[in-house]
Every structure is written in C-alpha cells, then in structure tokens.
Amino acid sequence: MEYSFDRFDFLEVLDSSTEGSFIHDLELNEMYFSEKWKRRLGIENVPPKETFSCISRIIHPDDVMGVHIEFLNTVKSKLSKSQVEFRVKTQDSGYVWILGQIKIIYDQAGKPIKYYGTHIDITHRKQIEKYHVKSIEKYRKLMYSMDDMFCILEAVAENGDSPVDFRLIEMNPAFERHLGINTADWTGKSVKSAIFRFGDFLYAMLVKLYYTGEPGRTVYESKMTGNTYLVKAMSIDEPEDRSIALLISDITRDIKMKEMEKTIKMHEELFANISHELKTPLNVIFSANQLMEMYLKAGSNNREKLLRETGVIRQNCYRFTKLINNVVDLSKADAGFFKLDLKNENIVDIVENIVQSVAEYVREKDINIVFDTDVEELIIACDALKIERVMLNLISNAIKFSDPGSCIFVYVMSKQAAVEIAVQDTGIGIEKSQLDLIFNRFHQVDKSLSRNAEGAGIGLSLVKSIVEAHGGNISVDSAVNEGSIFRFEIPAGIVEDTCDTDKNLKTSSRVELINVEFSDIYNWDQSAD
Ligand code: ADP
C-alpha cells in the first residue's frame, strides 16, 4: 500500500484540534497527541516514544484488554478501520468514556506501520444510555410486579384496503394470572387475528386512539371470567411511533365492596327509618292506652271515649301492619325472594272491584272516584293480591294529596302486548326534580306536605318492585297544583293454569287489605264496634 506522509504538517493539524487526535508511528514507536488532549490526559511532558505505554497505563484496567484485542483483531483481519469504547483517566474529571476510532496504514507486505485517529468524549452519551437502561429496568420491574394487566401494542399501519391492526409487543405476567393467557404465545400476535379476549370493543377503542390520539377508558364486564375490568388505553410515544399502552385492572372486588358499602348504608338508613316510623303508631297506641286506663279508673260512664280510643288503637295497629308488610316485602324484593302467585285473571275486574270497594272511603273525604276502561275483559297472568296492593297504594296517595271536592280517575287501557292502568288526581302535584326520586325508598317530597296524612315513603318503591316483578314498568307525569298521573304497564301474558283462579278476593280479606293500606288516611274510631 502506497503511503506518503509529512508528519510535521500533521502534527500542526493535531495541535489545532480540540478533540483528542493522535497518530502512532508503529515503526518508530512514536505517538503524537493533540496538545489539549495531552494536557487533559496529563501526558503533556511524556516523550512520543513513551506515550503509547503511558496511555495504556491510564486506560481503565477493565477496558485495557478489550482495546488491545480490538486492535489485534482488526489487524488480523487486515481491516483499515476500527473503533472501540473505553474509559481513560483525565486530569479534570477522573475516568471518562472515550470512543476511539482509528485508521490503520499497512505496508505492501500487509504489516501495520501507522495508525491515526480520534478520541471523542462520550461520557455524557454513556450516562444517558445508563440512565435509559436503568429506567427500562425500573419500568420492567414495575410492569412485571404489578397486579394489573399491562401490555404494549404497536399499530400495524393500514395497508391499502386492509384496516389498521395492532400487534402485542410486550405483556406482563398478570395476563397469565387473570386470564390464563400464556404471554409467550401471544406476544407478537395481532390483536385482531388473535381475537384478544376482551372482544371487539377493545379493537374499537384502539382504532379511536390511533386516529384521534384520545386516550380511551371503558368498564367492561367479561362474560368469560364473570369479572369487571377497567380498561385504559393511551399512546406512549410520539404519534408516528404508534405505540399504545393498555392497562387492564380487575375492579370486581372494588365494585362489590362499593355495593356492599351501599347496601350496608341502605340497611342502616332502612333501620333508622323503620324504627322512626314504627314509633309513631306505637306512641299513639301508648297514649290511647293511658287514656283508656284513665277513663276506666274514672268510672263507668266513659263508654264513648273508650270506644274512640280502641278505634285509635285499631287504626294504629293497621298502620303497624302496613309498615311491617311493606318492609318485609321490600326485604324480599331486595333479596330476590319476591315471588308472585301468577294466575290468569281478568285485570279489568280486579281494578274495577278495588275502585268500587274504596269508593265509599274516598267519598267520605269528599272526593269523587271514577273508573273507566276500553275493554270489558282482559285476561292476563298476574298476582291479583299484589295488583290490589299497587292500586290501593296509588289511590291512597291520590287521596292523600288531593283536596276535598276533587276527582280521582282510574282507567284501564288495553295495548298491543300489555295493559296500561292509570291513577290520575287533580291534587298538589309533584315538582319535576322530584319525579325520579319518589320511587326511591323513604323519599317524601316534603314531610310537611303530607298534611294530615301519615306515610313512611315506602309505598311507591314497593309499587315499583311489584310492577317490575310482573315484567312491567311504572312512570309518573305531574304538574305542581294541577295533579299527577301514575301509569303502569303489565305485559299481557298467560300462564298455564294449575288450579282454579280465586277470581274475587274474599270481601272480608279486601276490607282488611283496605284497612291496612288506607290506615294512613282514615280514622276507624267510629268503626270500632
Ligand atoms: P308515602 O307513604 O309518603 O305516601 P310513597 O312512597 O307512597 O310514600 O310516596 C312518596 C312520596 O311521593 C310522597 O310522600 C309524596 O311526596 C309523593 N307522592 C306520591 N303520590 C303522590 C301524588 N298522587 N300526588 C302528590 N305527591 C305524591
């Protein structure tokens, strides 16, 4: 190989360099470094013949071997260029990382005679690399130790007509624990073709994120595991890198805990309300009892007063019974034990009979009640006793919140696959904001608006449970000072009759039922005998 070289010109160039530049003449064993670099390495007074061995001494002991081996291998392979990273001791900052790059000059026989090159300080880059490696390690540790499922996906860009797809790049072992997924089998697979076990919604979420950059968040109930998951998807790179992180947390326990807390709170409220409501009739019974004792002690001519007090006791026993019946039924509904005794009944008869039975009571309040129907007979599967309770609840509310002289309308309307029953009044009405709330347990728009009527705020929630148990629904329309209309629908199904239908509730039972259901609004002091 032809080579001509004016060493002294080159040395001048070396000195002007701020990086570490050098030339090593192997035949003379003389090594020349740029002045600044020599100063940095603390070898400014070392003669050229000793520079090489001196450099070898200031290379980090762990790296010396690597540097020599790299040089020998390059020469052995007759390569002209080589580079190696190593640490060298400097005067100003101790060991620094160097990228050494050389070009070797061979003679015609292939013997290396010179090499020249550069030393570049790469300490900063090395620090960044180290920090990077460390943060990757930290991220991996976190990813592998977390209980939530975490994976990285990469978008596989659209290709002509084929839509965007996503490939699983990395998955943590939580997938194995939660879903029994062998992560090794799944890594590298396409989300779409592998039909990722979370179903189509996940793909839709990823596509949205891909096109809009908007992070996604969905609560998903898996039929496969029966558990509920919170799934979050977010971009973790610049948009063009198309990397997406998915975090899937099993929130089944949290939800159950919240439900339990809600149930406990509801039960606490229920007990507080029940004990409060039970105290009202109980106190009345106690007072009536005290009065009766007083009248009895006072002599024998207090028959009228005694009778009135037994009436008060009876009415409050009915209130007691109503409250207990309602509470028992609500608890049954809560626990899913609310069973209907379904029989094929003429719903028109049931509603008409109940209206007739209460007509006298209603008129006593100077209120009129009108029944209307668009069919004579409509046989549907229902629990007659429970429908009577619904009707009595709605009618008793209509009475409670109406003024004397007003009218209550009850009507039955046959619909295509259902029957609609409505109770309408022209009473005080309900504010719009309250309409959704009145079906909640113990909700009363305003206790003071209950006027002379006592109530516990349970009636409508029970009515709703009964209607829903029939597969129906209930709604209310109302305007303040104009009145309210409660409509409920029951599907017009038929059951296979197992025994004779007890078409009409025995009159004595109905009277008892009315006494119980209307106990809030009537005094039975005259009916005590
Ligand atoms: P309550 O025993 O208090 O009547 P309900 O559950 O039957 O309990 O009713 C809840 C609340 O809904 C009542 O307290 C009342 O504020 C309101 N409400 C129900 N029906 C009517 C109605 N027909 N007119 C006006 N307000 C009504």
Image (cartoon, grey):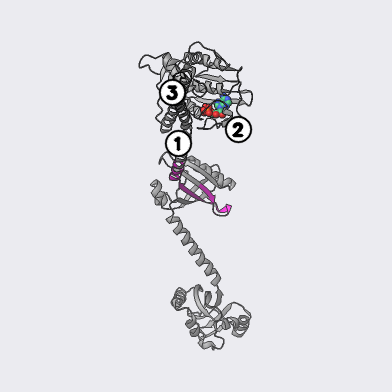
Name the residue that disc number 3 marks.
296
- Which label's residue is closer to the chain start, 1 or 3? 1
* Residue type pointed to by label 2: Ser
Mark 3 Cα-neighbour bin, 10 Å: few <14, some 14–19, many ≥20: some
* Neighbours of disc 2 within 10 Å: few (<14), some (14-19), many (20+): few
Q: Earlier in the sequence, mark 3 or mark 2?
A: 3
| Quadrant of the image occupied by residue 19 | bottom right
Residue 72 coordinates in the image, percent (x, y): 45, 77
Q: Tell me the magenta residue range.
A: 232-260
- The residue beneath circle 2 is 433
Q: Element under label 3?
A: helix
Tag 2 secondary structure? helix
Q: Nearer the viewer, residue 474 or 210?
A: 474
Q: Residue at x 45, y 50 (%)?
A: 148
Position of residue 180 in the picture relative to residue 139 (left or right): left
Q: Percent position (x, y) of residue 60?
A: 47, 78
Amino acid under disc 1: Phe
Report x, y in % for residue 398.
56, 22
Q: Amino acid at mark 3?
A: Leu
Q: Earlier in the sequence, mark 2 or mark 1?
A: 1
Please name the residue that numbered disc 1 is placed on.
271
Residue 42 vertical position relative to residue 355 in the rendered view, above or below: below
Q: Quadrant of the C terminus?
A: top left
State which image quarter holds ligand 1: top right
Does the image show residue 476?
no
Label 1 near label 2: C-beta < 8 Å? no
